[in-house]
Image (cartoon, rainbow, N blue to C red):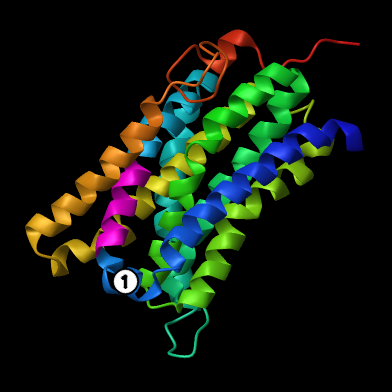
Amino acid sequence: MLESLQAPLFFGLIAAFVTTLGLLAVALRSDWSQLYAGLFGLAAAGMLITMAFLHIMPEAFALSPQAPIWLTIGFFGGLALSFTVQTIFPEREASALPSEAITPILAIAMHSFIDGIVYSVTFAASFSAGVFAALGLIMHEFPEGVIAFAILRRHGVSNHRSFLWAFLAAAATTPLGVIVSGPFMYGLGGEAIGALFALSAGLLLYVATGPLMKPLKDTPPGRGLAALAAGVAIAVGLATVPLPGHEHEHLDGVSEPVADVQLYEPEAS
């Protein structure tokens, strides 16, 4: 059991490290990141929307025929969750985490947790499949840290607390997903993974088109649209970078669908 977790946990920790690098990149410039928190939020929205359409949703639709249903549930579930959180936890000046930031951070945490599950499942199928899946997923970890930090700073959370909460949500949840899913890795099929991908995509789309778009009304149109476009460009660039020595078995949603290569059905012993 412990040996079977070594490889996925190793790559899960690498993913957490890359996310932390993204956090450090903006946290070390705390005054600057606070000054431009609105623009960071819009860039984060552009990245999230693009990542959802180019990376998460193609995987979900390739793996599960029920993906559209789960995508819809995720989107409106995010809306319901946001309303519920703000109703139960109204804003207080002394609050460590503003209620408006809870839903976006939970959405990112859920997505990162699912990444950890994917590591476990693909390594259970074969080592090479796990490596290729991990490389494809790790590519989006750096901006994920930036996005989480930007969301928190946008809602007035201090630099120190933003780093802590963003680390817990975007970085620590990936190896946690590996650990929690490890005992069940052989029983979780591709369709279940597809449903989880679609659910997280719906949540992230709500976050990107709702809470993260709020700065648009307070930002000069040119600067706001430029920030949004920059986020889109970064995500597109990451999604189109080819992985060395690999063309068919990774989880980036561009090449051959995972369902076709049966990564989730290990051979019977």
What span is in magenta? 39-49
Q: Return the x and y of residue 199 as percentages of the image width and height.
A: 50, 40
Q: Quadrant of residue 187?
A: top right
* Identity of the residue drawn at 67% across and 33% down: 119
Could one spot residue 209 in this view of the protein?
no
* Residue to which mark 1 is pinned: 32
Furthest residue in direction bottom, as rendered: 94
Crowd rating for badge 1 (residues with CA inside 10 Å; few <14, some 14–19, many 20+): few
Q: Nearer the viewer, residue 155 or 102?
A: 155
Q: Return the x and y of residue 133 as percentages of the image width and height.
A: 60, 26
Could one spot residue 67 in this view of the protein?
yes
Name the kind of residue labelled 1 in the image. Trp
Q: Return the x and y of residue 264 as percentages of the image width and height.
A: 69, 19
* Identity of the residue drawn at 62% across and 49% down: 16
Q: Quadrant of residue 34?
A: bottom left
Residue 25 is inside the magenta segment: no
Locate the C terminus by quadrant.
top right
Locate the N terminus by quadrant.
top right
